[in-house]
Amino acid sequence: DALLQLRKAVDIRPEQVESISCKISRTQARNLRFPDPKNGNESKFSMPYCISRALLRGQLTLEDFEDPAIKEPRVRALLPRVSVIGSEQKLGGKPLDNEVVVKLKNGTEHVCKTTEPKGDPKNPMTQDELFNKFRDCAKRRLETEKIEKIIESIMKIDKLGNIKELTDRVTYL
């Protein structure tokens, strides 16, 4: 989340990056244990991969975690430049911020800290973000037209005469 925020605020291009340092909790660091993922499953548990992919694309989608995506040369080139530092989880009972430091080849450093991940009640997704995430997940099984009709039904759920209109649309056969 911190890298995506930083990417929106500052025009950072992959070729400018000397290094990226990610300070996260020790628990997160243990869970994200694949610095150089070999397949799609490992990429889901790789902070360097997620950071590299997010820098390149400005987002992460389900397709980014499939085997062909992790082999992309531009992603592979960024992986060794990303380091992960596991730190204490709490300071005085309060969670520490996650921090991303992007050091550019010209010596400039950009820092972004986040406390709450995107989607947390304290940092909710926008309606557009939520529906785009739904589209990304649903497109694996449903046609675009059906996805949009489901979103349309959700948007007017309080005006539906019968919830069956929505349930019929979300039923996958």
Image: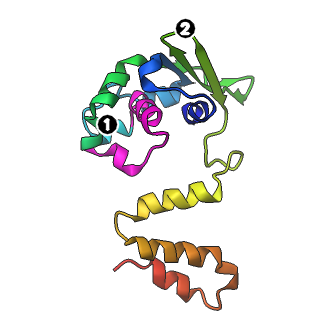
Residue bearing mark 1: 42
Judge by depth and name the residue closer to the eye, 117 or 70.
Answer: 70
Q: Is residue 99 above or below residue 162?
A: above
Q: Residue at x 45, y 44 (%)?
A: 60
Identify the main secondary structure in magenta: helix
Is the Cβ of the residue at disc 2 closer than 8 Å to that at disc 1?
no
Which quarter of the rendering shows the C terminus?
Answer: bottom left
**Image quadrant where residue 141 sits:** bottom left
Residue bearing mark 2: 107
Q: Position of residue 11 (x, y in %)?
A: 56, 28
The amino acid beneath tag 2 is: Gly
Between label 2 and label 1, give the one nearer the viewer.
2
Q: Position of residue 61 (x, y in %)?
A: 42, 48
Which type of secondary structure does the marked residue at label 2 adopt?
Answer: loop
The amino acid beneath tag 1 is: Glu
* Residue range (magenta): 45-67
Q: Residue at x 35, y 49 (%)?
A: 63
How packed is label 2: few (under 14 Cα within 10 Å), some, or many (20 or more)? few
User: Is residue 54 rendered magenta in the image?
Assistant: yes
Q: Residue at x 61, y 90 (%)?
A: 162
| Left or right for 95, reference 23 | right
User: Is residue 91 rendered magenta in the image?
Assistant: no
Outermost residue on the bottom side: it is 161
Q: Is residue 20 above or below residue 128?
A: above
How packed is label 1: few (under 14 Cα within 10 Å), some, or many (20 or more)? some
Measured in 3D between alpha carbons, the distance from the residue under mark 2 to the one under mark 1, in whole angstroms, is: 32 Å
Q: Is residue 172 above or below residue 20?
A: below
| Left or right for 54, reference 110 | left
